[in-house]
Image (tube, rainbow, N blue to C red):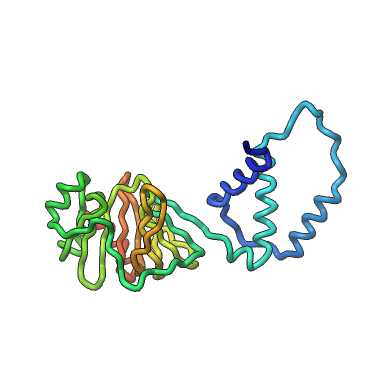
């Protein structure tokens, strides 16, 4: 049987994925603010019959924890910012270790474009700016279609109702290139997130990537080093 303290700890832990820290004030300012709050005159006691809602208590404690964490460089370095899109989770602040050699997606096999469209059941599109792909694969039970061109350019398309890919990278934060698009300019570790148990399988070190979604369909265009060129390619999907 759990105690109220255990419940409170669980609620605070659950806040971790939703906390995003602004630039921190100097520690001296944090200390001064805390001292001023302590020295404020005590308000009249509230009627004992009314209790503060539990969520307010949790939020108040979380604010204190965030303030103290943000006050030190060590605290700021420990924070991982998480961006969840359709089918893709981006974790800024941690750089996973990619495998020595690239790992294919589960069940990946080569097919032609017509077969890929038949197997997946969603409209597989091709960017007119690149022309027909040199190679096409399906994977993960025919739920992911990957198109390949020369020089390492790759376009993955899949239904992104739940996160499937995890991208781990250091700062800077991904750049928004439209309401549904994000540009990752740096190399980063790409992993596959198991749909059943949530474990990660590192796949490879991915190059600059544009990720976006259209309804329930997620897209990731990898291997184009220019943001402007990547947006141009994405805009030409037909």
Q: Residue at x 83, y 50 (%)?
A: 38
* Of 163 and 126, the residue lying toward us: 163
Taking the image as shown, residue 105 lies to the left or right of residue 62, namely left
Q: Residue at x 35, y 69 (%)?
A: 207
Q: Is the residue 6 above or below the residue 35 in the image?
A: above
Q: Is the residue 53 above or below the residue 224 in the image?
A: above
* Residue 84 appearing in the image: yes
Taking the image as shown, residue 60 lies to the left or right of residue 119, namely right
Taking the image as shown, residue 177 lies to the left or right of residue 114, namely right
Q: Residue at x 63, y 40 (%)?
A: 7
Residue furthest toward the front? 1
Taking the image as shown, residue 101 lies to the left or right of residue 115, namely right
* Residue 227 appearing in the image: no
Q: Is the residue 189 above or below the residue 37 in the image?
A: below
The x, y position of residue 237, in whole percent, is: 23, 55
- Count the labels in the image: 0
The x, y position of residue 123, in whole percent, is: 20, 47
Q: Where the N terminus falls, by quadrant?
A: top right
The x, y position of residue 163, in whole percent, is: 38, 50
The x, y position of residue 76, in whole percent, is: 61, 64
Residue 132's quadrant in the figure? Answer: bottom left
Q: Residue at x 38, y 54 (%)?
A: 193
């Amino acid at each position: 049987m759990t105690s109220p303290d255990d419940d409170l700890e669980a609620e605070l832990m659950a806040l971790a994925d939703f906390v995003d820290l602004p630039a921190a004030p100097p520690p001296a300012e944090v200390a001064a603010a805390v001292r001023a709050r302590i020295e404020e005159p005590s308000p009249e006691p509230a009627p004992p019959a009314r209790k503060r809602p539990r969520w307010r208590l949790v939020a108040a404690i979380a604010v204190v924890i965030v303030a103290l964490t943000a006050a030190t460089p060590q605290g700021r370095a420990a924070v991982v910012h998480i961006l969840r899109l359709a089918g893709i989770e981006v974790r800024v602040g941690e750089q996973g270790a990619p495998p020595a050699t690239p790992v294919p997606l589960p069940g990946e096999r080569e097919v032609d474009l017509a077969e890929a469209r038949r197997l997946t059941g969603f409209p597989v599109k091709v960017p007119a700016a690149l022309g027909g792909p040199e190679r096409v694969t399906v994977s993960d039970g025919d739920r992911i279609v990957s198109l390949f061109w020369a020089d390492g350019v790759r376009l993955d398309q899949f239904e992104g109702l739940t996160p499937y890919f995890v991208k781990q990278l250091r700062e800077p934060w991904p750049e928004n290139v439209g309401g549904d698009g994000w540009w990752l300019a740096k190399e980063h570790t790409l992993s596959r997130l198991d749909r059943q148990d949530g474990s990660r399988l590192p796949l490879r070190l991915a190059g600059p990537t544009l990720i976006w979604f259209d309804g329930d369909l997620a897209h990731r265009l990898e291997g184009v080093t220019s943001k402007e060129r990547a947006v141009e390619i994405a805009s030409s999907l037909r």
